[in-house]
Amino acid sequence: MKSPASLLFALLLLLAGLPLVAQLRLPALISSGMVLQQNDSVALWGWAGPGEKVYVKTSWSSSTDSTLATNLATWKLRVKTPAAGGPYSIEIKSRNTINLTDVMIGEVWICSGQSNMEWNYFNGTSDLAAVFPTAKNTNIRLFHIPRTGADHPQEDVRANWVSADSTTIKSFSSVGYFFGRKLQEELNVPIGLINASWGGTPAETWMPEANILNDATLREAASKLKTFAWWPSAAAKAFNGMIYPVTHFNITGAIWYQGESNTETNASYKQLMVSLIDSWRNAWKKELPFYYVQIAPFNYGQTNIGALLQEQQTKLMSHPRTGMVVVTDLVDDVKDIHPSRKKPVGDRLANWALAENYGKTGISFKSPAYQNHSTVKNRLELTFTDAKELKFNDKEASGFYISGENEAWYPAKAKWEKGKLILTAKEVPKPVHARYGFGNTLIGNVFNEAGLPLIPFRTDDWVVEQKPL
C-alpha cells in the first residue's frame, strides 16, 4: 500500500501535466471582422494543447472540420469558402471555444513596400479627405501590421481587422485604400487589405535571408546598403516580422511601391525583385500576381541613379504575372520623394487587377512603352505598344533627347505621324538613339489616348554616369 506522501506526489505529477487554462487560441489575422478568400480552400490555424482535437464549424457549411494539435501545440486545417458574401460566423472548439463573427468572404490583397506605400492622411496625402463622406463601407476591411523587424520568422503580429470609415482609413496606406476602394466598387464584393509597409526599407529586408546569402550578386549589393536608425536594411528583417506571419493566409495577390532605397545599387534591382517575388510565391504556394509602382522623379543628389532604377523596374515587367504603374505625371516637386496624390496610384494598380485578374474588359491599364526605332535620314522613327496615338499635354512634347554615334545628347522635337513618333534635332544630322524622361528629375508630358503616361526609356545601352552632384 502506497503511503499518503507518495500518493500526494503522484497526484501532483498528474496535475502538473494538465493544462490549468484554456489553450485554444488564434493569431491576430484569424479574428472577427476578417475577410477570407472566396471560392478557395483557406487555411485556419492557431495553438491548442498538444494532442487535443480542434473542431471548426462555419455558418456557410453544414459540415464540421477537425484536426489534432501537434506536439508543438500548433494546429492548422483548411476549409472551403463559398462565393463572396457574408457576414458569417465560425466556431472553433477544443478544450475551450472561440466564436468568430462578422466574417466576410471576398478578395484579399497585401500592400507592401516603403514610405510611398505606407504614406497616409497624417503624412500629408492630399486626396484622402475628399472621400471621407463616403468612406464608411463594411465591405472594405483593413488589417494594418505595425512596423516590426525580427531576426527569425514570427508566427503572429499585433494588429486587428477594422471596417473602412473616415477614421480608420486615415492611418492606413492611402495607395492601398484607394486600390481596395476601386476593386470594391467595380467587383461589388468584400475586399480585405493587409498593409505591411515600412518607410525607408530596401527590398532586401522584405525577402528571406537565404535569397540574398545564396546569390553572389545580391549579396554584394546588400553589403553596400547603408544602415539607418529608423528602419532595417539587413536581409529578411521585415519579412520575418511582417510578411512571414501572414503567409498562411490565402490572398489573391500583392501590390508594391518601393525602390527609392535601392537606387544606389540599381544595377541588380530587377534580379533582386525577381527573387523577392518568387520567394513570396513560394511562401504562399501560389503564383501571386504582383503589381508595382515605378518610382517617381526625384532629386537624389547623385546623377541618374533614379533613372537607372526606373529602367530596372521596366525590365521587371518581363517576369510573369507582373505589371507596372507609371506616376511621372503625379509629381509636383522633384525635391519631395513622396508625391501627395495617391488616388491615381491606387486606381491604376486596381485597373491592372481588374483587367488581368478579374477579366474586366474595356479598361486601359498599361502605359505606352517603347517598342523599336529606326533611322530615316535625319530623324528617328519610334513605335510603341499600348498606344494608338501619343499625345502631348502642351503644344510640344518635352523630355525627348537624341544622339548620334558620338554619344552627345540634344533635346529633340517630336511629332506623331502615321502611327510613329518622329524625333529630330538640328544638332544631330544622323541620330541613332533616343531617350525619354531619362534622368532623376526629368518629367515628360507624353500620354496615350487613355491618359496614361509614357514609360521613361532609352534605346541605347551606353555607360551612364553616376556621380554626386
Image: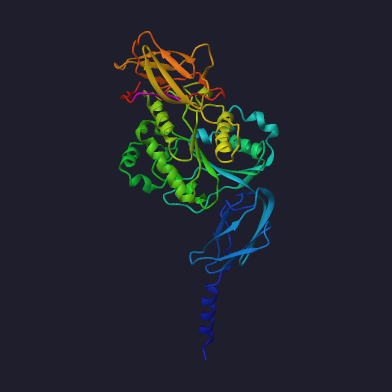
Foreground of the two, 49 or 40? 40
* Left or right placement of residue 425 versus residue 36 in this view: left
Residue furthest to the left: 406
* Horizontal and vertical percent position of residue 398: 47, 15
Q: Is residue 268 above or below residue 461?
A: below
Which residue appears at 60% of the width and 48% of the height? 160
Q: Is 464 above or below relative to 202?
A: above
Q: Is residue 406 left or right of residue 379?
A: left
Give the quadrant of residue 170. top right
Residue under the image location 41 percent in, 41 percent down? 274
**Which residue range is magenta in the image?**
455-460
Is 412 left, or right, of 106 in this rendering? left
Task: Please say whether residue 457 is one of the residues in the magenta stretch.
Answer: yes
Would you say residue 363 is visible in this rendering? yes
Assess whether residue 426 is covered by the magenta stretch. no
Nearer-the-camera pick, 88 or 30: 88
Residue sitting nearer the eye, 438 or 369: 369
In percent of width and height, residue 118 lies at 53, 36
How is colour applied across the structure in the image? rainbow
Q: Residue 469: give x, y in percent of width and height.
A: 35, 20
| Frontmost residue, 282 versus 142 | 282
**Can you tell which quarter of the image residue 435 is in?**
top left
